[in-house]
Image (tube, coloured by chain):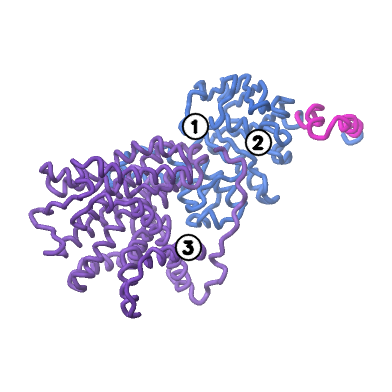
Chain colours: A blue, B purple
Amino acid sequence: MSLLELKNVTLKFGGVTAVNNLSLSVEEGEVFALVGPNGAGKSTVFNMISRFYRPFRGSITFDGQDLLKQKPHQVSGHGIARTFQNIELFERATVLQNLLVGRHRLRKTMLLEEMLFIGRARAQERESRHAVEEVIDFLDLQAYRDKHIAGLPYGVRKVVELARALATKPRLLLLDEPASGLSVEETQDMRWWIEDIRRQMGCTVLMVEHDMGLVGKVSDRVLALADGAELAQGTPAEVQSHPAVIEAYLGTSAISKTANSQGERV
Amino acid sequence: MRFHFKTTYDQDIRLFPDLWTFSLYAGLLVLMFVMPWLISDFYLGEMTNVLIWAVAGLGLMLLTGQTGQVSLGHSAFMALGCYLCVNFMDAGLPFLLSFVLAGIVTGLIGGIIAIPALKLHGVYLAIFTLALAILADDMIVILEYWTGGVNGYFAPPLYVVGIEVNRWVNPAAWYYLALGTALVVTLLYQNLLRSPLGRAFAAVRDSEISAQAMGVDVARTKAIAFGISCAFAGLGGALMGLFAGAFNNETFNFLISIQLLMMIIIGGLGFVHGAFLGAIVVAFLPQFLSILTDTMGSASIPGLEVGVFGAILIAFILFEPMGLYGRWLKVRTWLELFPFARRDMFKRQKSYLKTERLR
């Protein structure tokens, strides 16, 4: 059984069909990439998994459980963490506090314990602090630990968002364009981190990404979307050379050109 | 220049990060304790007033500064706290028990009201809560049996562990009562800030969408914040009414809410210190102005206080949105780094345009 399964999912906004009868399954331990032109419905798929949107038809199951029965805040409880395309960090808090919010799903204390800071509250804080420090070490954020988000450069914010998602101890990590806006070096770092997340933490990754270089290097399987429907699925190389994908990105006349040039290049 | 060398995680969890900070606050506490011997009864009364405003201000600070929800209705909850407290006392409960109970019940009622109210955002929430404040005025008149209506209610004598707390007989006792309440409320506030719920408040303030993705139940968290905020406001209101001695529907006019909101903005939104600094401004401004008009030889000018208060608020919003405490942080950093502080150190960075917000 797959870890995450979407079956015949359809979502419409008014007259626009954002996602049309889409099915996909992500296996435990793999890196799965969603690619496609702008407006193809990639982020919408993420937002349905996060339960911000409810699909009209179809089902979404995670580890055999029906995700559509969950409220948005309960999704992370199942071990699904995500990042956002337009960084959604807690701006007026420090990096450390941001990461500690990631531990919220593991909160055991009651209101009164926290207000009086007795009993489990202190022990829980120590444990959270320790767990967060591991993530800080993993992503090399030591220098920014006590800095406020508002003053951080874009590239660092991107990493902090990844760190916050990792602090929730996820089984499935949803990365919405992890490399957008990053420099070549930062993208390289991101690639190694994604590989390490899979290898060291045993975490499954589902990502949306436009940088085909990154997608080709880290992902096991790729699904190409256009206008909310599946175009092609397979290994990165298969999808990149699929005629329907080339058509969606470059237009119809491009197909014959690539077909011609392919013979010369290979 | 000081450096923080951290050797244990507890240093990030403790209330005071180092011995220096601890001794500063311990010194302040000692100063507060010996205050009755240092200043005259008149100024001791003013200090009591500052502390009472600070308690109510901490309540609104938790909601507005910490959780990002505006309320113009806190005068209603101050009134509720006050009338609950005196009614519990009339029912024969001792003062301290009535006081604590009044806070708790106000908090519960506030939390229940918050469930529908906090579906609203920004200006709509402000309007809703403003309506609550105006409604409270009428409710006090209607519920004359419990509130004394327009004629007012005369506070019963207060006894704390057998000692009478009377503003005219022993002002020091009143001062200690207000100080104790302010200390307890501050401690509860600080404990919240260093635990998951306090961080969830900040998460809801800065990004509801990612708070949800992190497993924070936004509606519930907002309701809890509103409840705790109302509880603190209720305690502040109870002290304010009892300190005044007599109170009616006018005492908890909706202008009190607005004053409370102005106070925390001037003090510094989102900082515990801000509530206290703002309270000092609110409580001492009328005295300061009357001294000023006296020395200038003119009679008191009606509306001067409100006008000056408004002007100060506008100046703060324009030039120092972080309030008095924000200004102090800048001064402190400048002093700590002297002579290496840079001019543009605190220049605010333009943040990226937020699009595709799911709201």
| Label number found at residue A72 | 1
Q: Nearer the viewer, mark 1 or mark 3?
A: 3
Dominant SS in magenta: helix
Q: Secondary structure beneath disc 1?
A: helix
Amino acid at circle 1: Pro
Discs 1 and 3 lie in a common subunit: no
Tell which circle, 1 or 2, labels the residue nearer the N-terminal end.
Answer: 1
Residue A208 — which label? 2
- Subunit under mark 2: A
Q: Where is residue B95 in the image (x, y as percent from the top left)?
A: 14, 49
Q: Is residue B359 left or right of residue A224?
A: left
Quadrant in which the N terminus of chain B is drawn:
bottom left
The three-letter code of the residue at mark 3 reads Ile
Q: Mark 1 lies on which chain?
A: A
Query: Does A262 sit above or below residue A160?
Result: above
Residue B341 x, y percent position in the rendering: 52, 72
Which residue range is magenta in the image? A239-263
Q: How crowded is mark 2: few (under 14 residues within 10 Å), some or many (20 or more)?
A: many
Q: Residue B270 placed where, x, y %?
A: 42, 55
Real-space CA distance between mark 1 and mark 2, rounded to the nearest whole angstrom: 20 Å
Contact (Cβ within 8 Å) of mark 1 with mark 2: no
Residue at 64% x, 22% y is A23
What is the distance, in whole Å, between disc 3 and disc 2 at their CAs?
A: 45 Å
Mark 3 lies on a secondary structure that is: helix
Residue A262 on the magenta segment:
yes
Q: Distance between the residues labelled 1 and 3?
A: 40 Å
Q: Residues within 10 Å of mark 3 (few under 14, many from 20)?
A: some
Residue A156 in view of the camera: yes
Tell me which amino acid carries mark 2: Val
Residue at which label 3 appears: B314
